[in-house]
């Protein structure tokens, strides 16, 4: 992690990675059920910057309402089994609730709401012990039954079920939850209940009151007839968790403001079960401002107290603004890329038709030579020079340097106009046409539109009239829905942050694809036996060398088949007014250091405080 020091000392602690040729962050992202794999460990030269700034600013004090500027809203309410969580959604989510597991500063999964976790010898049974004495905001207990219900809502949901397909029978007794796995061992199971949305525990009573909770589905695996007979009068936009703040209001149609107020009975507070005084803020308001310039200007003018962004150009500007405090990190981060819809043929695992209606039949992205041609024609160095801020690097795959699966040479097509034209000639010959055309979707942030327009201009410079790409800006709340349903040709995207390659399974395995028009987490709907085989190795084999080799094989397969056009590895920045303290501090209940800014810009908000208890 790289952090600007506070109050007058403006040394920025840039390490070697900060000087590489940049690429731009700020594309769309969906992080539904878990964070995904990848990310390096930041810069060792900046370790001293990871220390808390509390000693410089004084002791934390209570008070103040923090207004936080977000890049996007989250669609479909806040229940983890149904919400389409944008990266931004994890700010309100981490305010409202906590997860079963956390990640420490070494990237290891450790208990949080859980007090212990264990597994049998072959990783087919996991036992989770839940801390005693914690209550949800509605006064109901966080016990094994509540955890079991949370797990089953995610395992039984059409949206998140693919991520939890290995969850077998779940039993609960007192504070002990036992999960049997399906389809063999599950080596990294706790990671799926850590930084992913389904790891955040919600009140059983609130979940049970929602009309579409899986336990109300008579055709689902967790149907509960008694529950189905009860009123379904809950509000999915009014979450009930165990977190430092309780839900107060949400106005998606009026400025997209999510407001939560201090939980006086927080389990990590004076009335809780640990010797802590959290939280410090009176309230937090998360306000959506999609346009990056508007968001940054609102911070500078005092309308926002803090904001986040993955826009490298803006991050560089914020770091140079002496009136602001900016934290920057690339730890376990995502990859920016162009996602291609390759839905065709049959699912390698299920044998079902992926595009039975032929909705994707005219998409030239079905031809691997077309995909390779477009990859060869993107000049990442030029993109960096014209759009980057000097703090990101071009990508050759989904696994950044320092992560399991990274390869210096993944086989992904490098910038080469001669090779690009050769591949395009083969593409056009195989398709029996003189040119290809497709729609290119991006979010409606003007910066993103301009960036992706530059990419299209590179294709036009390389191929002339042989390629026609029509750019279509889309509001981000709708954007995620199009990805889920597969209603796109080419899509600007950002995803795949996390600590373990197993967390990629739900995005890439064949079983997570579905026909166009049905929700699926394998958005590009590729069905690849090589990727499937290696994902299963990563999930089931505890041998670390075997898991690493499998991740590298996946990287090489992506390089060969070009299911995505890789662009750059993401840098995230959190910038705030100077009176805001400990923006990303994450001290765990036992005093250990939890990971701070990481995983697609996510960080904890329960330890933030403002000078003199006033955020203004």
Image (cartoon, helix red, strand yellow):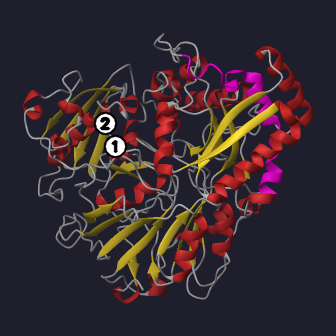
The residue depicted at 64 percent of the width and 59 percent of the height is 446
Q: Is residue 77 magenta?
A: no
Residue 496: image x %, image y %?
55, 42
In this rendered view, identify the residue nearer to me: 520 or 241: 520
Q: Residue furthest right?
A: 418
Q: Secondary structure at mark 2?
A: helix
The residue depicted at 37 percent of the width and 71 percent of the height is 607
Whether residue 413 can be seen here: no
What residue is pinned by disc 2? 154
Residue 6 drawn above or below residue 598? below
Residue 76: image x %, image y %?
35, 46
Looking at the rendering, in which quadrant would you find the C terminus?
A: bottom left
The residue depicted at 22 percent of the width and 63 percent of the height is 267
Residue 184 drawn above or below residue 449? above
What residue is pinned by disc 1? 198
Residue bounds of the magenta highlight? 358-385
Q: With 516 as the anchor, is 361 left or right in this view?
A: right
Whether residue 122 can be seen here: yes
- When asked about the image quadrant of residue 587, the answer is bottom left
């Amino acid at each position: 992690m790289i952090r600007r020091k506070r109050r007058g000392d403006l040394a920025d602690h840039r390490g070697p990675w900060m000087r590489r040729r940049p690429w731009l962050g700020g594309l769309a992202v969906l992080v539904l059920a878990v964070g995904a794999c990848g990310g390096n460990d930041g810069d060792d030269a900046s370790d001293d910057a990871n220390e808390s700034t509390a000693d410089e600013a004084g002791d934390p004090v209570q008070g103040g309402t923090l207004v936080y500027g977000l890049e996007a809203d989250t669609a479909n309410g806040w229940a983890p089994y149904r919400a389409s969580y944008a990266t931004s959604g994890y700010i309100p989510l981490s305010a409202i609730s906590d997860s079963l597991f956390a990640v420490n500063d070494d990237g290891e999964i450790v208990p949080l709401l859980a007090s212990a976790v264990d597994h049998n010898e072959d990783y087919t049974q996991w036992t989770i012990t839940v801390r005693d004495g914690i209550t949800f905001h509605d006064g109901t207990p966080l016990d094994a039954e509540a955890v079991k219900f949370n797990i089953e809502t995610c395992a039984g949901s059409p949206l998140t079920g693919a991520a939890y397909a290995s969850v077998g029978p779940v039993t609960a007794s007192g504070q002990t939850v036992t999960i049997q796995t399906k389809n063999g061992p599950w080596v990294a199971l706790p990671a799926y209940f850590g930084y992913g949305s389904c790891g955040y525990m919600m009140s059983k009573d609130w979940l049970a009151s929602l009309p579409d909770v899986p336990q109300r589905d008579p055709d689902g695996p967790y149907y509960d007839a008694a529950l189905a007979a009860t009123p379904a009068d809950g509000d999915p936009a009014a979450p009930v968790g165990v977190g430092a703040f309780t839900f107060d209001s949400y106005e998606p149609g009026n400025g997209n403001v999510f407001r939560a107020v201090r939980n006086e009975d927080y389990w990590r507070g004076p009335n809780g079960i640990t010797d802590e005084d959290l939280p410090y803020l009176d309230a937090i308001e998360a306000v959506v401002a999609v346009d990056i310039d508007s968001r940054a200007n609102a911070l500078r003018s005092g309308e926002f107290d803090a904001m986040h962004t993955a826009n490298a150009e803006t991050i560089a500007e914020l770091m140079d603004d002496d009136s602001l405090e900016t934290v920057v990190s690339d730890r376990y981060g995502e990859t920016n890329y162009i996602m291609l819809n390759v839905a065709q043929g049959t699912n390698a695992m299920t044998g079902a038709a992926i595009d039975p209606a032929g909705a994707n039949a005219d998409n030239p992205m079905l031809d691997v030579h077309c995909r390779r041609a477009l990859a060869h024609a993107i000049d990442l160095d030029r993109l960096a020079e014209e759009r980057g801020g000097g703090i990101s690097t071009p990508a050759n795959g989904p696994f950044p340097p320092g992560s399991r699966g990274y390869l210096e040479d993944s086989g992904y097509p490098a910038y080469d106009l001669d090779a690009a034209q050769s591949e395009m000639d083969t593409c056009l010959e195989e398709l029996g046409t003189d040119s290809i055309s497709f729609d290119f979707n991006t979010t409606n942030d003007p910066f993103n539109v301009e960036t992706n327009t530059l990419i299209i201009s590179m294709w036009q410079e390389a191929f002339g009239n042989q390629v026609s790409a029509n750019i279509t800006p889309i509001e981000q709340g709708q954007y995620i829905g199009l990805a889920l349903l597969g209603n796109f040709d080419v899509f600007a995207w950002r995803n795949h942050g996390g600590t373990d390659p197993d967390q990629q399974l739900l995005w890439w395995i064949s079983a997570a694809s579905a026909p166009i028009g049905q929700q699926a987490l394998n958005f590009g709907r590729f069905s690849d036996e090589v990727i499937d085989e290696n994902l299963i190795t990563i999930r089931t084999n505890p041998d670390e060398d075997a898991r690493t080799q499998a991740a590298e094989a996946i990287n090489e397969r992506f390089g060969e088949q070009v299911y995505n056009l890789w662009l750059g590895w993401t840098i995230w920045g959190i910038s705030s007014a100077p009176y805001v303290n400990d923006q990303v501090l994450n001290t765990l209940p036992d005093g250990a250091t939890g990971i701070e800014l990481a995983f697609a810009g996510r960080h904890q908000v329960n330890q933030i405080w403002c000078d003199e208890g006033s955020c203004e």
